Image (cartoon, rainbow, N blue to C red):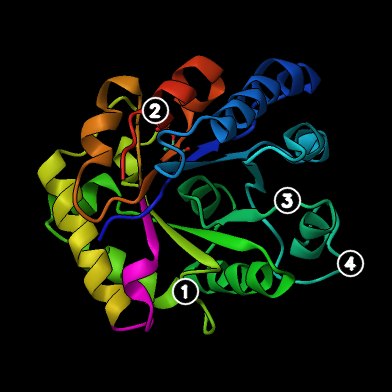
């Protein structure tokens, strides 16, 4: 089934004030300009997820353009005694639209379990955000041929009740491909995305409409092939989203 591709950028812990002007602004201008063009209008949407200190500024820059802005995490609670954390309600309050949850770097650096990821996704959805739930196997799991088993379990345990295609995006990111320059083969991407769709079919009635993104060393040179793969509804991009030029090039690779 063909749908509008989602081109999402995860800036990770990169982004000081100057990124607002130098990176977010050209992307907002590009999306504004795209809105005025009659062709290719609906082939892709663009989302960027900057770090918290500049999130509000980036939302302001995105303004009325079609550039969407999200966070890289959220807390499970609405408010309270959680020093240093940010709730989904606060993220929604500044008019961001998405929250990445369960990125492998958070699973590893902050010991986030599937249970925590599920609670974060539920909190994001309850606040009115779209949760971008990340899953993916580590190298040893793939080498042992357990990647589909691992990812299926992550989906089962990380997707909250009430998740729909409207409030949930799934990002498949093989951990060994993140920031390493290694990319899963197209066949591997196709097989995993098919398995994810089948798993979603057991969990969500509108599973066909759920966007399933691929992430892991996506760049302009490989984006077209990845985006053309069956069941790939977009990409989650780290390193290459830190240049407006390369991120726009990746977006332009998308066709419905
Ligand atoms: C990511 O951070 O989600 C990611 C996929 O990073 P990179 O594109 O740099 O591999």
Could you give the CA–CA distance between mark 1 and mark 3, rounded to whole angstroms? 21 Å
Residue 12 in percent (x, y) is at: 59, 35
Q: Earlier in the sequence, mark 1 or mark 2?
A: 1
In the image, which is nearer the foreground, mark 1 or mark 2?
2
44 or 21: nearer the viewer: 44
The answer to whether mark 2 and mark 3 are in CB contact below 8 A is no
* Quarter of the view holding residue 251: top left
Residue 43 in percent (x, y) is at: 39, 42
In the image, which is nearer the foreground, mark 3 or mark 4?
3
Does 207 appear in magenta?
Answer: yes
Residue 137 in percent (x, y) is at: 30, 53
The residue lying at 69 percent from left, 75 percent from top is: 126
Q: Is residue 41 visible?
A: yes
| Residue corresponding to mark 4 | 81
Magenta segment? 202-213
**Image side of residue 188 versus residue 202, left or right:** left
Judged from the image, the quadrant occupied by ligand 1 is: top left
Could you give the CA–CA distance between mark 4 and mark 1, rounded to whole angstroms? 26 Å
In the image, which is nearer the foreground, mark 2 or mark 4?
2
| Residue corresponding to mark 3 | 96
The answer to whether mark 3 and mark 4 are in CB contact below 8 A is no
State whether residue 54 is above or below residue 76: above
In the image, which is nearer the foreground, mark 4 or mark 1?
1
Q: Which mark is residue 252?
A: 2
In the image, which is nearer the foreground, mark 1 or mark 3?
3
Q: Secondary structure at mark 1?
A: loop
The residue lying at 77 percent from left, 38 percent from top is: 63
Q: Residue furthest right?
A: 80
């Amino acid at each position: 089934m063909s749908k509008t591709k989602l081109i999402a950028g995860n800036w990770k812990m990169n982004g000081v004030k100057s990124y607002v002007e130098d990176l977010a602004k050209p992307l907002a201008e590009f999306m504004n300009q795209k809105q005025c063009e009659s062709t290719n209008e609906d082939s892709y949407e663009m989302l960027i997820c900057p770090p918290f200190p500049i999130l509000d500024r980036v939302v302001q820059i995105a303004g009325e353009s079609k550039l969407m802005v999200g966070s890289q995490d959220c807390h499970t609670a609405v408010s309270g005694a959680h020093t240093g954390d940010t709730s989904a309600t606060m993220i929604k309050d500044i008019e961001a639209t998405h929250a990445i949850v369960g990125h492998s770097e958070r699973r590893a650096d902050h010991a986030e379990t599937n249970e925590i990821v599920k609670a974060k996704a539920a909190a994001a959805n309850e606040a009115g955000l779209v949760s971008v739930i990340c899953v993916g196997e580590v190298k040893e799991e793939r080498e042992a041929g357990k990647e589909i088993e691992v990812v299926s379990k992550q989906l089962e345990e990380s997707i909250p009740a009430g998740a729909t295609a409207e409030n949930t995006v799934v990002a498949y990111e093989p951990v060994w491909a993140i920031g390493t320059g290694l990319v899963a083969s197209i066949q591997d991407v196709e097989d995993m995305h098919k398995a994810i769709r089948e798993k979603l079919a057991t969990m969500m009635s509108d599973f066909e409409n759920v966007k399933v993104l691929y992430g892991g060393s996506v760049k302009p040179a490989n984006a077209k092939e990845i985006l053309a793969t069956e069941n790939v509804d977009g990409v989650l991009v780290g390193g290459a989203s830190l240049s407006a030029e390369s991120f726009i090039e990746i977006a332009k690779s998308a066709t419905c």
